[in-house]
Structures are given as structure tokens and as C-alpha cells.
Image: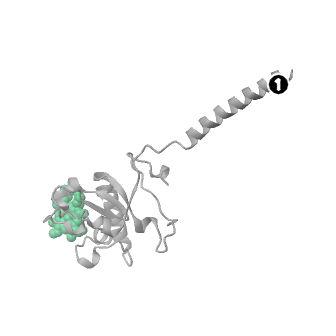
């Protein structure tokens, strides 16, 4: 009798171990998707279109787009090259290439300019260019704490919600 009880325990133990190892494997399955990249200003400036053959990146509203396919706009000597390699949100909102507008800062923009920014963000940047990451400024506050207002943009090639 006692031997059949211990066989029973051994069996139960075996089932529990097998079940829980399966659970652990599932729970901690490695992410298969490409990680989202965070760009500081110094990272972003490397992709300003000045080097032939290198990708060209620019950010709008803290979202970093690969605009290499638009190198006739953003490449070296192209009309909008000043927008590349940085977060040019204010310039896009105001349709301006003035140096003081080549910034993420949207302070004091009119509601028409903010509306225009959103329209261009969706109809040009999200529609034409892949997202390669986010600016560090968008994700983190000045003190390094997470920015609670961060809202990842949905892109079919990766699901940012899985990454954080
Ligand atoms: C005389 C002034 C300008 C003219 C004639 C002009 C003309 C154009 C044209 C023809 C396009 C292409 C539209 C298309 O085929 O989809 C374009 C796109 C664009 N323009 Fe201008 N533009 C001017 C000034 C500006 C300025 C000052 C900015 C400042 C931010 C600007 C930002 C853009 C942007 C962001 C695009 C979209 C580029 C892309 O598709 O990636 N433009 N512009």
C-alpha cells in the first residue's frame, strides 16, 4: 500500500515538474520581434544624410522614421536636408526651415499648426516611411523616469506594446 502511495506521489511530482517547466518556457519565451530603438540627439545626428550610402533618419513627434527612400528630399544637398538627423517637429508644423524651428519643441504653436503637424505626420511620415524607434526624450522625462504620456504608434512590422 505505502509503495503504491509513493509511486503515486512520484507520478504527481513528475506531472507537476513537467507542467511547470512548460509554463515557465511559455511565460518567459524570448521576444522574436526586433527591439525598439531609443535615439538620443547624438545618435540621431549620425543619420543626417551627409554620408552617401548611410540610412537617413528624422523624427517627428518623437517617432524616428527611416526616410532613406525620400533621399531626393532629405539627402545631402536636397531641399529638406535640414530636417534630417534630428527631431524636426516644429519645422514640420510651421512648414519652416529656419534654424530656430529645427527642434522637437512645440511651445506656442497655434492650433492650425498643430493640426497641420498631425495631418503631415499621418499622411506623409506614417504613410511613407518605416518607424525605426523613438527619441529618448519622448520615452523618458528629464529626470530619467518613464514618460507616462508615451503612446507608441502602431506599425504592422512590430508591436511596440510587447516590448515594454
Ligand atoms: C517654395 C516653397 C516650397 C515648395 C514649392 C514645396 C514643394 C513641395 C513639393 C512639390 C513636395 C512634394 C509633394 C509630393 O509629391 O508628395 C513637397 C513635399 C514636402 N515639403 Fe515642401 N515645398 C516648399 C517649402 C517647404 C518648406 C519650407 C518645408 C518645411 C518643413 C517643406 C516641407 C515639406 C515636406 C516635409 C514634404 C514631404 C516630403 C516627403 O514626402 O517626405 N516644404 N514640397
Ligand 1 position by quadrant: bottom left
Q: Nearer the viewer, residue 31 or 11?
A: 11
Q: Position of residue 127 (x, y in %)?
A: 31, 52
Instruction: Residue at 41% x, 69% y: name it.
Output: 137
Q: Residue at x 69, y 29 (%)?
A: 14
Tell me where residue 90 appears, x and y as whole percent: 32, 72
- The way the protein has been coloured in the rendering is one colour
For residue 139, above or below residue 70: below
Q: Residue furthest left?
A: 77
26 over 1 or under it: above or below: below
Would residue 65 appear left or right of 7 to someone viewing this image?
Answer: left
Give the camera-side residue of 119 and 59. 59
**Label tally:** 1
Quadrant position of residue 2: top right
Q: Quadrant of residue 25?
A: top right
The residue furthest front is 3
> Label 1 CB, ligand 1: below 8 Å?
no
Q: Spot the residue most to the right.
A: 1
Residue 145 image position (x, y, % from top left): 51, 69
Q: Residue at x 65, y 37 (%)?
A: 20
Q: Is residue 52 above or below residue 5?
A: below
Front in this rendered view, residue 11 or 48: 11
Question: How would you rate the neighbour count of disc 1 (Cα within 10 Å): few for under 14, some for 14-19, many for 20 or more?
Answer: few
Which residue is found at the position 22% from the left and 55% from the top?
68
Q: Is residue 77 left or right of residue 26?
A: left
Dot 1 falls on a residue whose secondary structure is helix
The residue that label 1 is drawn on is: 5
> In the picture, which quadrant includes the N terminus?
top right
Q: Position of residue 56 (x, y in %)?
A: 24, 59
Amino acid at each position: 500500500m505505502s509503495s503504491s502511495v509513493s509511486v503515486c506521489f512520484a507520478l504527481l511530482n513528475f506531472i507537476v515538474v513537467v507542467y511547470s517547466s512548460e509554463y515557465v518556457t511559455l511565460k518567459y519565451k524570448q521576444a522574436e520581434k526586433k527591439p525598439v530603438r531609443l535615439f538620443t540627439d547624438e545618435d540621431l545626428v549620425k543619420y543626417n544624410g551627409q554620408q552617401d550610402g548611410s540610412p537617413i533618419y528624422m523624427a517627428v513627434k518623437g517617432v524616428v522614421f527611416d526616410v532613406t527612400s525620400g533621399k531626393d528630399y532629405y539627402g545631402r544637398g536636397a531641399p529638406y536636408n535640414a530636417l534630417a538627423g534630428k527631431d524636426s517637429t516644429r519645422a514640420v508644423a510651421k512648414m519652416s526651415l529656419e534654424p530656430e524651428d529645427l527642434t522637437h519643441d512645440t511651445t506656442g504653436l497655434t492650433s492650425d499648426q498643430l493640426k497641420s503637424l498631425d495631418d503631415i505626420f499621418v499622411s506623409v511620415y506614417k504613410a511613407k516611411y518605416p518607424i525605426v524607434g523613438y527619441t529618448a526624450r519622448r520615452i523618458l522625462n528629464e529626470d530619467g523616469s518613464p514618460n507616462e504620456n508615451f503612446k507608441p504608434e502602431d506599425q504592422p512590422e512590430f508591436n511596440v506594446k510587447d516590448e515594454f
